[in-house]
Amino acid sequence: MSNDDRHRVAITGASGLVGRALCRSLSTTGHDVVRLVRRQPTAADEVLWNPATEEIDGRALEGIDAVVHLAGESVAGRRWTDPVKKRIRDSRVLGTRLLVRTLAGLDRPPAVLVSASATGFYGDRGDETLDETSDRGEGFLADVCGQWEAETDVLAQRGVRVVIPRLGVVLAGGGGALTKMLLPFRLGLGGRLGSGHQWMSWVGLEDLVGMLQMVIRDLRIDGVFNAVSPEPCTNREFTRTLGRVLGRPTLLPVPAFLLRWVAGEMADELLLAGARVYPRRLMDLGFEYRQSNIEETLRSELGRRRPEVS
């Protein structure tokens, strides 16, 4: 898929942080974007799909050139009760199953499916450096990612190129995890989580959109790749850097026991766990990062220029 040709790209999760940015980028480079929505379509570029009721308008997907599957229940922001965990799992596993089954049954399936996963696949791995050859870790998120990725096998067996980006924490000034962190940091209440030694594998939104567009058109890429910066950082480093960018102190660490009391299982898997993930496949393919350094990325996304040195 080249920028010189016009293609039709269908996107689930098009209203989310990454989906909105990808839609904008594809549209401005001359491609036709089709948004899969869970309500009755109200525009010509919308197609119905509802994993909860197993509804999808497969006929509208005939002739689509590429599908980017980004939809999934948020894993952050609430305690992981059993019903919440079920929604997290079902939104990924059952949603992917419905989409893949539909695409596999088309007379003209897409040339490529890009189906998002996450670095949660690797679990909590301490200081171990992980790449795409590393084994799956342990825990709820690792299990969900493993099942999520496995649902694409049916389409791969049909001969469709399937690409699975394992996303790190997406950093963007316009939403997502970074926006949720800003208020306490701006109030001077930011601090490391637990020991602060846990690794954070992250990716800037601009780079992530570039990665997704590259893998759509590059026939050399199939299977898994790590959608992260080549420079992961610890939670302690991230905390200090964000405080410096905002010009605020970061002197109030949040103890692990308090995080566990407030967030339960989510604290151990999402806030106190870490994975030091390296994007080996992207580096081997020569992907050109614009956002590889954590401080420069935060300054860019938050509109904070580096102070002039006199």
Image (spheres, rainbow, N blue to C red):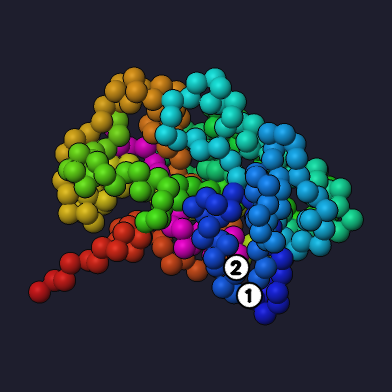
The one nearer the camera, 127 or 58, is 58
Question: Measuring 45% from the left and 35% from the top, which residue is drawn there?
Answer: 76
Which one is nearer the viewer's eye here, 107 or 229? 107
Is residue 227 toward the left or the right of residue 300 in the image? right
Amino acid found under the numbered disc labelled 2: Leu
User: Which residue is labeled 1 in the image?
Assistant: 30
Residue at point 36%, 48% (across, down): 178
Give the image quarter of residue 38. top right
Inter-mark Cα distance, 1 to 2 = 7 Å
Relative height, residue 261 to residue 8 (above, below): above
Q: Is residue 17 visible?
A: yes
Percent coordinates x, y for residue 298 in the rendering: 32, 57
Provide residue 2's location: percent of width, then percent of height.
67, 74
Question: Dividing the picture into quarters, in which one does residue 133 lie?
Answer: top right
Is 237 placed left or right of 133 in the picture? left
Can see residue 279? no
Count how many numbered circles sit on residues in the image: 2
Magenta stretch bounds = 195-213
Q: Which mark is residue 26?
A: 2
Q: Badge 1: few (under 14), some or many (20 or more) residues near its Cα, within 10 Å?
A: some
As drawn, the residue found furthest toward the left would be 310
Identify the residue at the far front of this view.
42
Residue at 58% across / 53% down in the picture?
Answer: 14
Residue at horizontal 53 percent and vertical 26 percent from the top: 84
**SS at badge 1:** loop
